Image (cartoon, rainbow, N blue to C red):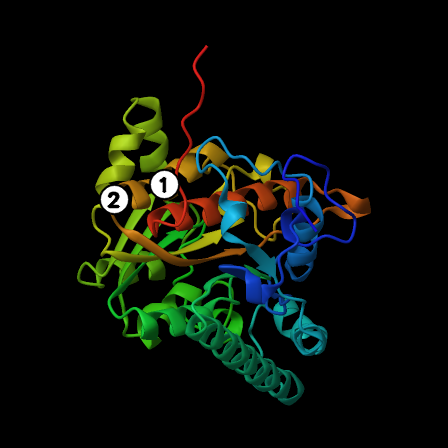
Amino acid sequence: MSFDPNAAAAADSGIFGLPFAPDEARVVLLPVPWDATTSYGSGAADGPGAILEASRQVDLFDAETGKPFEAGIAMLPESADIRAWNNEARLLAEGIIEAGGNIAGDAELESALAQVNAISARINDVVYLDTKRLLGQGKIVGLIGGDHATPFGAIRAYAETFPGLGILHVDAHADLRHAYEGFEHSHASIMENVTRLIPGVSKLLQVGIRDFCEEEITRIGQSQGRITTLFDVQVARARMQGRLLDVFAQAVGKLPRDVYVSFDIDGLDPALCPNTGTPVPGGLSLLEASALVGMIAQSGRRIVGFDLNEVAPGEEGDEWDGNVGARLLYKLIGWTLISQGLSKAPVLPVG
């Protein structure tokens, strides 16, 4: 059956309305419906489904990245096990989150915390094995969360495959807290866990950070250059002075050749993601985010993989967050393919 990229997507089509099966696609998306330790607003577990639904409205020719769909993009089905584990862990975590993690001496909550941590470790192992398997098949793997705790296993697999890996981390939050509220694999601890537990990651570049605690500032300062943080206030000042692209280029210049992009959608202006779990004023526009990621490809570096997290659908079927998430996802895929020589940026007509 022929595929017309200019036609409307069929209701039963795959991601972006595409007809590819995973074994036919160069890019395979791994959905992880997990948000058990989210401490403010929940809903990110439904992010993969929201992105899938909204993606069918995305036109397949992109002004910056051309025709990423031609390489083949497929999304795996959600794991029923992960969904069940999330529901179980979410119930266990409620009392802990309500207590702000102050549960010392409460045997019931201490037991619940131990169970949540065990389930989180199980999720990490499953994601690691799935990512490792797909990388072994020559796939480019993109993880779709879920909250920002979800990509730990994927980053571990990528760091083993590409030693010396650098990470571009776009986020409103530094995510450098240690076992936030007692959760060893909290969404607020993902980059602390990555830099502490995955030695194959040589560099962490954070962009857009605007919500952080003193402990995290100390962690950055003591990293001996392994962590570089471009705070949102620095981004905003560069924007006002008309030198934002220069600041982005200087930051990207600190990354090694092989780069993994970890993107929390709350790194964007919250007008673009109002239902994300922990929105913070400030942030990047969609085109600024795309320009930042694109600079990796344009600098001769290679984007080897990526994740996109914290997309949460709104109430009563509001699909704005899913819509933005799907378009950001297509940009991430496009720049990844260009950086690997598998796609080309378009030449737009003048006139």
Tell me if mark 1 has few (under 14), some (14-19) or many (20+) residues whose alpha carbon lies within 10 angstroms of its own.
many
Say which residue label 1 marks.
294
In the rendered image, the vertical position of residue 284 relative to residue 195, given as above or below: above
Q: Distance between the residues labelled 2 and 1?
A: 13 Å
Q: In this view, does 214 lie to the left or right of 273?
A: left
Number of numbered discs overlaid on the protein picture: 2
Q: Which of 201 and 178 is in front in this view?
A: 201
Q: Please state the horizontal and vertical placement of residue 71, each as a whole percent of the image.
A: 49, 51
Say which residue label 2 marks.
251
Q: Which amino acid does label 1 sit on?
A: Gly
Q: Is residue 217 left or right of residue 113?
A: left
The mark that comes first in sequence, 2 or 1, is: 2
| Residue that lies at the very extreme toward the left in this rendered image | 224
Q: Which of 123 and 348 is in front in this view?
A: 348
Kindly indicate whether the residue at mark 1 contacts the one at mark 2 (C-beta within 8 angstroms): no
Tell me if mark 2 has few (under 14), some (14-19) or many (20+) residues whose alpha carbon lies within 10 angstroms of its own.
some
